[in-house]
Amino acid sequence: MTKKGFIFDLDGVIVDTAKYHYLAWKKLANSLDIDFTEEENEQLKGVSRVKSLEKILSWGNKTLTDEQFKGLMAAKNEDYLNHISNMDEDEILPDVPRVLQLLKEEQQAISLGSASKNARTILDQVNLKSAFDAIVDGNDVSKAKPDPEVFLIAAEQLGVNPKDCIVFEDSVAGVEAANVANMISIGIGSEDVLGHAQYVFKDFTEISDDFIKSLINN
Ligand code: BG6
Ligand code: MG
């Protein structure tokens, strides 16, 4: 049996921080008189902070000076950090601990592969840091998803060949990144949005121990 590499996105996969990103971006967009819907928010999932603000500005046909841009990025993050400062273990999504525990028992390699620069803060907040053999986040990459860089670095840190890696992702860009990296992509969310993933589950409660074991053994 080869050891497999299991790579987890963070926001929307391990914890439901997508709702806090949404609230913070919406506040920012509305302050600029830009409309911001849940549908637009979907396009920001998995997308880096800089790229997200660029998209919002383009939707609203706005241009800013570098200084204004930086100021808004900082304001958004401050607002977001305020939301996450109240998080605790209760915000870990259902059955994520079961799957992490099973992978540990099966002695698999486990990494985080997140676009967020706040990933370590969040893992600390929900007390999950020790569940990971490697943590690769927005501070470690130069190219954002859908570029596969974040997952390829994770595979390297785990010492596992990319083709033996499995990625759990809730975003369109993240599933694309996993596919480009030649990894097995597992979408967490709706089939409508994540149809390009190899498997799609609504959430981890739908992922059985047997399915995880089949990924390990195939
Ligand atoms: C991703 C989120 O995980 O991280 C995006 O899905 C977010 O919504 C991105 O913009 C960057 O996060 P942060 O915490 O560095 O602003
Ligand atoms: Mg995500």
Image: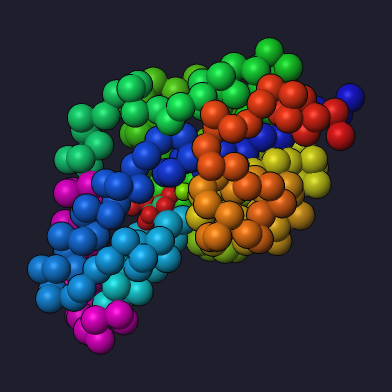
Work out whether 61 lies above or below 175. Answer: below
- Taking the image as drawn, is residue 44 in sight? no
Residue 32: horizontal and vertical position, in percent? Answer: 13, 74
Work out whether 135 lies above or below 182. Answer: above
Magenta stretch, residue numbers: 58-80
- Say if the magenta span includes residue 133: no
22 on left or right of 30: right
199 on left or right of 59: right
* Residue at x 35% of width, y 68% of height: 40
Classify residue 12 by image quadrant: top left
* Residue at x 35% of width, y 74% of height: 55
Classify residue 41 by image quadrant: bottom left
* Residue at x 86% of width, y 34% of height: 218
37 on left or right of 111: left
- Say if the magenta span includes residue 73: yes
Classify residue 28 by image quadrant: bottom left
